[in-house]
Amino acid sequence: MSHFCLLQDVDNYLADPYSLLEDAEACTYWLDLFETHFQATLDQAAVAYGKSASKHIEGARRDFAEQMSQLRSRPDALDGQLSVLALCRMREDFLQTHRLFDPFSHIKRRENEVSVAIYRDVTRELHSLEPADRWLHLVEAVFAGNIFDLGSPATMNTAMESPDFLAAVEDAKPRPWLVDDFDRLLEDLLISVPAKWAKAVIFVDNAGCDFVLGLMPLARELALEGVQVVLAANERPSLNDITADETVDMVQRLAMIDQDLPALIDAGMFEVVSTGNDLPLIDLSDVSDELNAAAADADLVILEGMGRAVESNYDADFSVDTLHLALLKDPNVAARLGGEVYDCVCKYRPVD
């Protein structure tokens, strides 16, 4: 494990530079949110694992409550560091310690089934669109899919109830978005024969419609344009994020119903790697050797989802072109960017 090889300034890189020790109001907000969300997570763990896990669930509830009480009296109790990233790590540590490895597994499976059922119709529609309209639709689909997020109170209930992806695409906020570099991005997307980029590393986010209907159509279109795609996913479960093993299985499954995917896979245009991560945010100072080997010759990085693209790594400098795509689902994160919940972020930073 080491720094991500495409970081520009390793010495000054901070995954999550927003210290909650310097903002009492934000500190209270995030402690309250994590406390409430952890209880909801344990409720889902009871569904996923049944009565046999009741002792593990109650142990996690007790230990987490004790840690939260300590943090409220001493916010610097986590080795003097308190950030959203640190709170995510704390939450995952308690779940792992009490053997609650994937409390949202049943919801991920359900949403994968719903998404696969309409994948063919979603991708078929792309063929009727002109290139500029197609790329816009693909970015809007990423925003729509990103609403399937069990880590945010604003979308947790929606995700539990199986979101209507097609309706979400129609309801997406129109341009201009809160952060809107799409016109500049489109200039480079429309370069063809060959495409501007040879290889793109895409840090993926959630299972269900986020990956199947939002991210995969975009990745597929890049591959059709001649861009080799590396799908970088979590090593282990976290919330409803898709793991690397699940990503492999899903790509293979989609290849059975998509006439273009098998040829792209056979041509080596798709690769799935583990980031080594097990959080909904990602610290690029500690990623897998597998990721770095795959990314060494990449010339585009895409960070998808609020956790990886905004809560962490929003101001990170990379040595290659970088695209951040995210739907903002938390009022505190949105306010930090001068926006509100359900605003869209399309931040594109070419190196030239």
Image (spheres, helix red, strand yellow):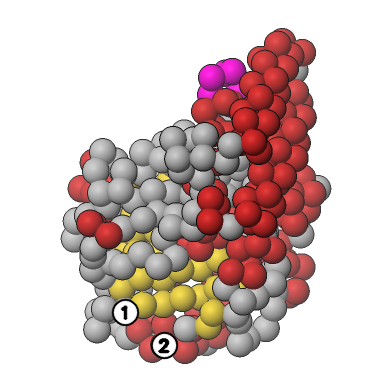
The magenta span reads 96-100
| Whole-percent x, y for residue 100 in the image | 60, 23
Q: Amino acid at mark 1?
A: Pro
222 vs 321, nearest the viewer: 321
The answer to whether residue 294 is magenta is: no
Task: State the mark number for residue 269.
Answer: none
Residue 229 falls in which quadrant of the image?
bottom left
Residue highlighted by disc 1: 350
Residue 307 appears at what percent x and percent y? 53, 55
Helix, strand or loop at label 1? It is loop
Q: Name which residue lies at 62% across and 30% down.
A: 70
Task: State the predominant SS element of the stretch in magenta.
Answer: loop
- Identity, as a three-letter code, of the amino acid under mark 2: Arg
Instruction: Specify the quadrant that holds the C terminus.
Output: bottom left
Question: Residue drawn 49% across and 35% down?
Answer: 78
- In the image, farthest residue toward the front: 73
**Above or below, comparing residue 251 to residue 188 in the picture:** above
The residue tagged with tag 2: helix, strand or loop? helix
Q: Position of residue 346 (x, y in %)?
A: 51, 75
Spatial separation of the CA atoms under disc 2 and disc 1: 9 Å
Q: Does residue 103 appear in this view?
A: no
Residue located at (70% from left, 11% from top): 55
Residue at (51, 63) in percent of width and height: 310
Looking at the rendered image, the quarter that the N terminus falls into is top left
Residue neighbourhood size for the residue with mark 1, other residues' Cα within 10 Å, grouped as few (<14), some (14–19), many (≥20): some
Which one is in front, 234 or 61? 61
Q: Would you say 77 lies left or right of 323 here?
A: right
Q: Check disc 2 and report the residue beneath it.
A: 184
Residue 42 drawn above or below residue 228: above
Question: Tags 2 and 1 in contact by the CB under 8 Å rule?
Answer: yes
